[in-house]
Image (spheres, rainbow, N blue to C red):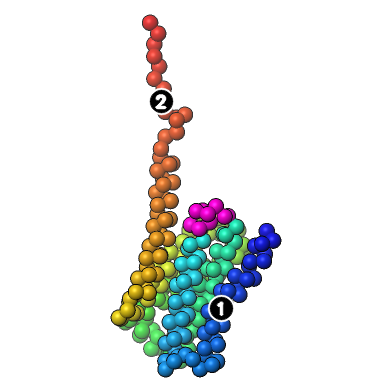
Amino acid sequence: MKPIRFFKPVIFLACLAPLAALAWKAYSGNLGANPIEVITHATGDWTIRFLLITLSVTPLRKLTRQPWLIRFRRMFGLFAFFYGVLHFLTYIWLDKFFNFHEMLTDIAKRRFITVGFTGFLLLIPLALTSTAGWIRRLGGKRWQMLHRLIYFSAIAGVIHYLWLVKADIRKPLQYAAILALLLGYRIFVWLQSRFKSKKPSPLSRPTIEVSEG
């Protein structure tokens, strides 16, 4: 338990490092000719990265047999939401200057913004119900069902990035490959559990009586 208490603040600070690096670039004037684009891409990248990190906790925990890793999943998920909020704020504040009519037009007409906005909306209920109190209120199964929205949010984020990029699509394809691997692992585990549940146990097999004579 003590190592976990030590690692938590260290990992928390590490999760803030991308924001600190971005703030330092802004302070020192190293954001390039289009600073809004740099901020938008950086916050969007880290939103997807933290979604993938969050989804990787469960497979990593099971494959390495280190159950304590689950204690960091909520932190990673909240940081995905945090960077998603920064990404969204960059769009509505620095890019659109709170021009809601123009934003609604973008959401309706530009498909990469539509799917990106959808992915962000899916993160909101996950962030709001991430506390232990909400787990008790919803119950374990309902809470787990709700938090499977992260799969769809991650898919929407990758599609958003893929549709946004016009030339070099290597990075969104890398994210897509990692996401496919993480979701594929979950599908494999689910199919394996279904197969085991349908397989009759040796004790339930019918016995053949052999008559003497």
* In the foreground, 99 or 167: 167
> Quarter-wise, where is residue 45 in the image?
bottom left
Residue 86 spot, x, y in % from top left = 50, 81
Q: Quadrant of the N terminus?
A: bottom right
Asked if residue 203 is positioned above or below residue 177 in the image, the reply reads above
Which residue is drawn at the image coordinates 45% and 30% (left, top)? Answer: 202
Q: Secondary structure at mark 2?
A: loop
Asked if residue 62 is positioned above or below residue 97 in the image, the reply reads above
Which residue is drawn at the image coordinates 39% and 20% (left, top)? Answer: 208
The label on residue 17 is: 1
The answer to whether residue 97 shows anywhere in this view is yes
- Does 10 appear in magenta? no
Q: Secondary structure at mark 1?
A: helix
- Residue type at mark 1 is Ala
Q: Residue furthest left?
A: 167
Residue 18 spot, x, y in % from top left = 53, 79
> Magenta segment, which residues?
59-67
Per the image, the residue denoted by label 2 is 206
Which residue is drawn at the image coordinates 46% and 71% (left, top)? Answer: 49
The answer to whether residue 137 shows anywhere in this view is no
